[in-house]
Image: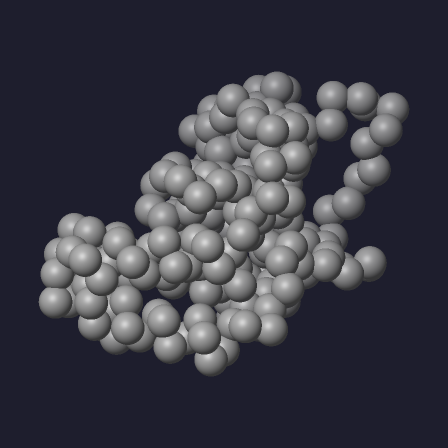
Amino acid sequence: MIESKIDYYEKEFLHFKPFEHFYARIEEMKNISDYGAKVASKWSEIVNQSLRDEVYPVVHPIGQETFSLYVEFPTGVFECALDIDGATSLINKENIKPAVFEPSNIIASVDIGNINTDTSNIKTNHKNPVMVIQSKFLTDNKPYCINGNHRIYEAYRNNEKQIEVYYFKDLEFEPFFYDILSRSVYFLEIDYHNVINNERKFLND
């Protein structure tokens, strides 16, 4: 399981300033190469024209299941909001099939901080399936469970033979972003990675 920093993240994410992060990345890209300057110019335009009125942190609606994926940047801890109900709708609409794992092979995706150890206070909610994402830019290229931590943990603890998991890698989970800032930060990190490493991976434009 993942060693948890949830308590730290839940305090620190409130202090994150998205536009300071955008401008820091833009400035760094601008000074690296001609390609970086071109990408930085594009992001300056996006930030100044399209993101100015966006509010952080996002307000999670009552009655809708979302998930806070905390991402550590040099500028602080960012709360990336994922729409779990929306992800389930997409799974059903696209008829996406789950992968089958031995619990011991997927338990590493579980953040211990997302497990309620008070068994008397666990509210069973299986309306949404077990989902794991893996992102080079948001999860350090490691699997991270965004829904169904308890189910994976219990399957592992009870030595069950297998568990069905909907597993999504970069860009596959892009539709899950609940708000524009989360989506924008994700694409910014892809562009930033491309500039820093002089690559053109994941995005064509």
Going 49% across and 41% down the picture, which residue do you hit? 76
Q: Nearer the viewer, residue 66 or 152?
A: 66
* Residue 150 falls left or right of residue 103: right
Say whether residue 137 is visible.
yes
Up the image or down, 4 lies above or below 33; here it is: above
Q: Nearer the viewer, residue 183 or 151?
A: 183
Q: Quadrant of residue 58?
A: bottom right
- In the image, taking residue 30 as reference, residue 140 lies left or right, namely right
Which residue is situated farthest in the right direction here? 120
How far across and how far down the image is residue 182, in percent?
Answer: 52, 59
The foreground one among 43 and 157 is 43
Q: Position of residue 188 (x, y in %)?
A: 37, 61
**Colour convention of the picture:** one colour
Count of numbered labels shown in the rendering: 0
Give me the residue at 41% from left, 75% from top: 46
Of residue 87 and residue 197, the one placed in the foreground of this image is 197
Quarter of the image with the C terminus is bottom left
Query: Can you see residue 103?
Result: no
The image shows residue 154 at horizontal and vertical percentages of 65, 26
Residue appearing at x 86%, y 29% in the figure: 121
Q: Quadrant of residue 23?
A: bottom left
Residue 96: horizontal and vertical position, in percent? 50, 62
Whether 59 is drawn above or below 204: the answer is above
Q: Which image quadrant is residue 163 in?
A: top right
What residue is drawn where x is 19% and y is 58%?
Answer: 31
